[in-house]
Image (spheres, rainbow, N blue to C red):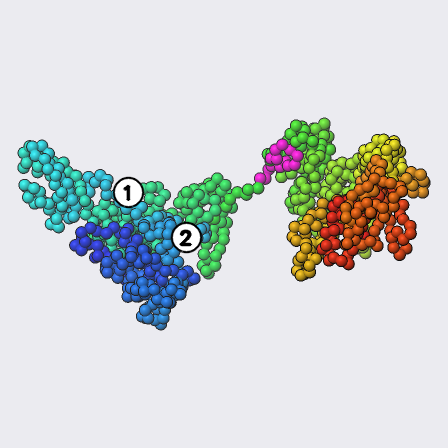
Amino acid sequence: MLKPTGMTLYVQQLKSTANTPSNQSKHMDNTMLFALRSAVIGLALTLFSISTLAFTPTAEQIEQFKRMSPAQQEAIASSMGVNLDDINAMLEEGAGGSDSTQKNPGQVPVSGKRTADNPTGQAVSAADSSSAMMAAGAMGQGMTIPGMPGVPMSPEALMMFMDSKEDKGLQPYGYDLFDFGAETFTPAEDIPIPAEYILGPGDTINVQLYGKESSKHELVITRNGTIDFPRIGPVPFAGLTFKQVSDKIEELVREQMIGINASVSMGMLRTIRVFVLGDVNIPGSYVVGSLSTMTNAIFASGGITQIGSLRNIELKRNGLTISKLDLYDLLLNGDTSKDSRLLPGDVIFVPPVGTRAGIDGAVKRPAIYELKNEKTAADLVRLAGGLKAQAYLQGSKIKRQGKQGELTLSKVSLEGNKASKVKIENGDVLMVGSNLEELNDVIHVSGHVKRETSYAWQANLRFSDIITSADALLALPDLDIALIEREVPGTREIQILSFEPTQAWRSPHSEADPLLQARDKLYLFGFEQDRTLVLADLIYRLKLQANIEQREQTVIVNGSVRFPGEYPFSQNMSARQLSLLAGGFTKSALNREAEITRYELDEDYERIVLHIAANLESNDPVLEAGDVLRVQQIPLWHTKETVELVGEFRHPGTYAILPGETLTDVINRAGGLTHQAYAEGSIFSRLELRKLEEKRLAALREQVAADIATSSLEASKASADIDRDEANQILANIDGTEALGRLVIDLPGILDRPDVLDFQLADGDILEIPRFKPSITVLGEVQFATSHFYNPELDVNDYLSRSGGFKRSADKKRVYVIKANGSVVLPKGNGWFGGRSVALTPGDTIIVPLDTRRVDRISIWASVTQIMYQAAIGIAAIGGL
């Protein structure tokens, strides 16, 4: 908002009038005025805001504003370009709690008056001024606004304040000095008064008389420049220094008051009025302490704006410039000799800034500096505190505004005396270059070493000069192969070299000991870590430099090597070197037999695939980039297969088997069966069947869970009988059922006719032969499920009768028998036991199933899983559902 140039000065005069000794007994400190002014800023800016920040003054802020005198309120409101009536109307409306304010506290209506900022007279939102952000947020709690003591800063204002401090490029130097507030530079009044201090009206002199008589007197210099000295009368003192006054008083007392001595000290100091004008934040007249200097007055005015000069601040007295202050002397050298003490009526004038130039890069204080007598780059570097250690003087540049309005960039050198010859113009930016962080003449060593580090390179440096022995490596090093990553001179493309560390140590400074070049990278390996991971970044960079004229410099190895995968292709790499790079052969390698698959293009650019057989012991062919090497494996080589024999064997245990070995072969190796072995009850399980049954049990559990969920929504009586605990028990029974993977075999028949019934074993097979079991078990829907001693004279009906007979829920037509070897005897004819019985043998189990027509599916699941839980024959029973 544009305002008349003299308005701010007039406002300051109003403030000063309200604080003169004639109107108040005590003058108000300018810092407090600054705080009060900041309080009303938040109130005023709520009327004219233009952003999304909503703000409502707090009760404390309103009271702070109300405690100001009318002259202060009017002066500060005028300085903000705000009508005081609008502020008062806003405060009255806020106190009344109108609906509009309650609904939208961020909307502060203006009282309809047309102003320069509100030509339509309409209400505007408090969220309508970007300048309101700091003032509005500052009225919260927490940190105080710099330069406004006692005015707390809200978190939002603090965030904006910190954002303003973020690096936004080069900033003018020195202006942040005024961010810390005027109170920081307020002169102390309890310090000894300098002897050269000139007294004037308003100063108080404390005189203590002692000797023949003792008394204390506070003597104030009147407007006439005199003091009324007791028993002596008016004595003129104005215009004298403190030392002169002290000497004069002591002389008067000695001459006119015999036997009495005087001790003189300063009491309350007078205030003086000075003007701070020019490019300061709040120009005007200020009442300051009589000990104040130029800098104290400048800070009281809010500091210098960024268009004001820091180096040519003038002190005017009686129309004449008596001193000039260069704040750079204070900021850069701590020199306050030019910070003159003020007298009444002095004028401090801050002119616009003069010539400026920036400096950036490898200097200690990069910023935009105001130039006074500085003309060259050397002068600008001195202002910036000098160069950093990493400065690259040959790579400096100057950014300058051209004659046609364009920006130009020119290279300059600041070496030696050259910097003093480089002229600096207004608006220039000198950019001092930095040294590169990349180490040039070094050798970097990584991988299986105790210390990954860099070594200084020098001419004729070899591998054995850096790594002198295997003691520099970690445990279990691979001493048969190592790689060198090298940059091709001129292009900086990567090429790979391979060598054997053991040969380099045996023949140092020979061809086996590679000669190193600057920026070489050594890769050393161990037997424990997968080296494809170590070389992954190198492989990536090799692939990046491939193009239509150069194939990817990589090769692939698989088969019987320790670390199969993709590797860098080195110059003249042989198949044996690649196998060593992959960790060497494994024990499954077939006499170092290998096959090389090579891809080539014919004249028509069609790919041709070549398969080249090689023996890496007798014939070590040279590879080409893109080749695939496969180290052949011993036929039928795989991990060791085992089977387990449990129970009544002469030598039970785990046996390793070869492909094609049969069941009777392993039984014979175990010494055969014992006399107590019950071959008819043998249990044979297979690993792949166990895995299959585990999947089926998982599917069964999901099906049961779904049926339980469905039954809970049905109102049938049967489903009501199954409570939540029973449902959980059903699922728990399924979870507790172990997958057996049982395969029904006729072991007695196999032992009698192995040439017909014997079969080959597989890895993970288990054969368990129990002792003879003279029992028959009855399970399912009987009155009492139990086991009975085997009696060859009893049939199925007899054992069912001895178990109490059928339950009402039993399915009498579907009774079946699970034989001891796991086979299930199915019904013959139209029904069970229709005139003939099933021949039972020891270890058999009679199962009476549930009549599924009488209960719902949940009851079925409950009964079935109970059978599974009791008999551990789940798969056989589930298969019958």
Q: Which mark is residue 337?
A: 1
Q: Which mark is residue 609?
A: none
Q: Is residue 483 inside the magenta stretch?
A: no
Where disc 1 sits, the SS reads loop
Name the kind of residue labelled 1 in the image. Ser
Residue 650 seen in the figure? yes
Q: Is residue 451 inside the magenta stretch?
A: yes
Left or right: 831 as drawn, with respect to 209:
right
User: Where in the figure is residue 510, as x and y percent of width and height?
Assistant: 71, 30
User: Where in the figure is residue 743, as x and y percent of width and height?
Assistant: 84, 45
Report the label total: 2
| Residue numbers of the magenta segment | 439-453
Q: Are marks 1 and 2 in contact (CB under 8 Å)?
A: no
Q: Nearer the viewer, residue 421 or 147?
A: 147
Residue at 7%, 34% in the rendered image: 213
Number of other residues with Cα within 10 Å of mark 1, as a class: few under 14, some 14 to 19, many 20 or more = few
Number of other residues with Cα within 10 Å of mark 2, as a class: few under 14, some 14 to 19, many 20 or more = some
In the image as oriented, which residue stretches furthest toward the bottom?
120
> Which mark sits nearer the N-terminus, 1 or 2?
2
Q: Distance between the Cα atoms at labels 1 and 2? A: 41 Å
Residue at 87%, 55% in the rendered image: 831
Residue at 74%, 37% in the rendered image: 583
**Disc 1 versus disc 2: nearer the observer:** 2
Location of the C terminus by quadrant is: bottom right
User: Where in the figure is residue 109, as x and y percent of width and height?
Assistant: 35, 67
Name the kind of residue labelled 2 in the image. Pro
User: Where in the figure is residue 849, as x and y percent of width and height?
Assistant: 79, 52
Location of the N terminus by quadrant is: bottom left
Where disc 2 sits, the SS reads helix
Q: Which mark is residue 155?
A: 2
Left or right: 459 as drawn, with respect to 400:
right
Q: Nearer the viewer, residue 573 or 90?
A: 90
